[in-house]
Amino acid sequence: MAYNQRVSGPSIAMINASTRVCAVFGHPVRHSASPAMHNAALDALGLNWRYLAAAVHPDDLAAAIAGARAMRYLGVNLTVPHKVAALEMLEVVSAKARLLGAVNTIVFEARGPAGEWTPLGRNPEDDSGPLRSHGHNTDAVGLARSLKEDFQWSDLRGATVLLLGAGGAARAAALQLAEEGIARLFLVNRTAARAEELAGEVSTHFPALKITANLPGETVDLVVNATSLGLKPNDPAPLESEWLRTHRPARVYDMIYRPAETALLREAKNAGCRTANGLGMLLYQGAAALELWCGRPAPVEIMRAALQQHIYV
C-alpha cells in the first residue's frame, strides 16, 4: 500500500508493515480521547499512520521516550503526569515549552537532504540514521484558539481575566493569556501562597501586566477554571455562585470537557454568563501537534466530530 494512499473502511485495515506510529503516554491513559481524534484525522489525510495510547509509569518515562525514538515513532503526546518531567529528557525543547515549564508534544526529527533537522513524519521513507527528540507545548495555543472560537472573540487584548488554580495548567494559561495581551489578571487558588507565587512568576515575564492574587471586586471579561474541581459528579464549583450572580462575568470557560457541563458552567449559565468547556482546547492542542508531525493542515472539523462522538455519544 502506498504511503499516502487513502483507505476506506475500518481503521484496522490500514495497519501493515509500512504503518507509522504516533502515541500518547500517560498514567493513567485509558480515558484519553486523543486516539479517536487523531486516528480520524489520519484517515482523512490518507496517511498510513496509527495513533496509540500507552500507559507509562513515571519511573519509566525516559525509557519509553527512548524506546519510541528507537522504534522510529513519528511523535508522542504527553499527558498527566509526564509534561514537566519530560523537559529534562529531550535533546531540544522549544522556547514556548521552556517558558511554560511543560512539554505535551514530542517530535522525532531526522536529518534532511541539506543536513537540517526535519520532523520524521515529513521524511516518510527514512528508516535509518540518527534521530533527536524535540519537545513542544501546544496546550497554551490550544486554549487561546478555543477561547477565540467558542466566544467569537477575535482579540483578547485589553481583557480582564479571573484564573482559578495555580498548578501547571493554570501556569500555562496565565502565561498564554499574558502573551495575548490581556490587561488585568486575577489569580485565585485554594492555597493563597501558590497564587502569589504564580503571580510573581508571570510578572517576571510580563512586568506590564497588572496581577492581583485575589477575587476581583468588579466584573471581568473572562473566568477560566484550571483546577480539577468538576471532574467528579459531586464536585462543588470552584467559584461561589453568589459571586457569579453579583458580578456576572461576560464569559466562563472550564478546561474540563468531561462532563460537558460542570457545576461551574451550570451556575454560570444560570447567572446569565456565556459558557464553554475545554473540548476546544483538547481539539486545538491536538491539531497543532498533528501539524508539527506531518506539516499539513489538520482536518479540524473531522477531529471535532470524532471527539464529540467519543466523549458525549
Image (tube, rainbow, N blue to C red):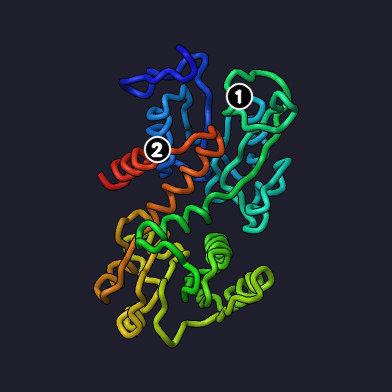
Q: Earlier along the polypeptide chain: callout 2 or callout 1? A: 1
Q: Which mark is residue 123?
A: 1
Q: Which mark is residue 272?
A: none
**Vertically, is 18 above or below 116?**
above
Quadrant hosting residue 35:
top left
Which element carries disc 1, helix, strand or loop? loop
Image location (x, y in percent) of residue 155: 45, 64
Residue 239: horizontal and vertical position, in percent?
39, 75
- Residue 73 locus on image (x, y percent): 59, 28
Q: Quadrant of residue 299?
A: top left
SS at badge 2: loop
Residue 189 position within the rendered picture, expressed as x and y whole percent measured from the top left: 51, 74
Q: In which quarter of the image is the C terminus?
A: top left
Residue visible at 47% across and 44% down? 286
Residue displayed at 35% across by 58% down? 150
Callout 2 amino acid: Pro
* Type of amino acid at the residue the image marks with label 1: Asn
10 Å crowding of disc 1: few (<14), some (14-19), many (20+): some
